[in-house]
Amino acid sequence: MNIPVIGVLALQGDVREHLIALAAADAVARPVRRPEELAEVDGLVLPGGESTTISKLAILFGVMEPLRARVQDGMPVYGTCAGMIMLADKILDPRSGQETIGGIDMIVRRNAFGRQNESFEAAVDVRGIPGDPVEGVFIRAPWVESVGAAAEVLAEHDGHIVAVRQGNALATSFHPELTGDHRVHSLFVDMVRANGTSESL
Ligand code: GLN
């Protein structure tokens, strides 16, 4: 079986942790900043960070439209926290000039769980991940206010949606790359493998 090549959008945020988690989940992982680099990956992770900054930098680097095109084309994509916001078709409370890539029919609320000093950890049961619950690290995390019919809710915390999948797009409010538990990354690597790597096309 071919080893998938998975990019991590490296404009801002916790890129390194995702590269490490993807490598641990048996993918070849590399940072992606430019459209040429995006064209070479089989799947992409959108890291946590600050979604307004990521949005502005993506536009500045000329990668926003190519990102939208590849996501619409079905490239597997996984967004954590700010990355989840980037995958939302709609933000409830966007900052001015803030855009998203879209791809998941959901409405997200930024900083919904509180600000930095209110960050927390909680055990989260994620559909499709066998065994113990995942340790969810929530840092100024969004939650999902509502999803459309095509989106599947994979996890909730305190009655709020915190993990969603729609086709080849996966999003979590929390940060599995910070825990050393690579099961969510493995789920994503499996999605990329199932979609086919460029060598096998
Ligand atoms: N609150 C941040 C935002 O709105 C997300 C925080 C995070 O990614 N840890 O983009």
Image (spheres, helix red, strand yellow):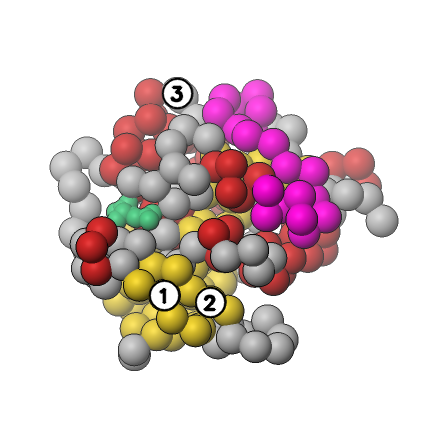
Residue drawn at the location 85% of the way across and 49% of the way down: 1
x and y percent of residue 181 in the render? Answer: 57, 60
78 horizontally vs 141: left or right:
right
* Relative height, residue 198 to residue 60 (above, below): below
User: Callout 2 environment at 10 Å: few (<14), some (14 to 19), or many (20+)?
Assistant: some
Residue drawn at the location 46% of the way across and 67% of the way down: 135
The mark lying in front, picked from 2 and 3, is: 2
Residue drawn at the location 51% of the way across and 75% of the way down: 133
Residue 191 falls in which quadrant of the image?
A: bottom right
Circle 1: element type? strand
Q: Determine if residue 108 is in view.
A: no
Q: CA distance from mark 2 to mark 3?
A: 34 Å
Q: On the image, numbered disc 1 is attached to which residue?
A: 121
Residue 104 magenta: no
56 horizontally vs 46: left or right:
left
Q: On the image, numbered disc 2 is attached to which residue?
A: 135
* Relative height, residue 74 to residue 92 (above, below): above
Residue 63 falls in which quadrant of the image?
A: top left
Q: Which mark is residue 61?
A: 3
- Of residue 151 and residue 1, the one placed in the foreground of this image is 1
* Relative height, residue 120 to residue 70 (above, below): below
Residue 34 magenta: yes
- Of residue 150 and residue 139, the one placed in the foreground of this image is 139
x and y percent of residue 165 in the render? Answer: 49, 63
- Of residue 26 and residue 104, the one placed in the foreground of this image is 26
Residue 60 falls in which quadrant of the image?
A: top left
Residue type, mark 2 in image:
Glu
Residue drawn at the location 19% of the way across and 46% of the way down: 94
Residue type, mark 3 in image:
Phe
For the record, the magenta segment spans: 20-38
The mark lying in front, picked from 3 and 1, is: 1
14 horizontally vs 190: left or right:
left
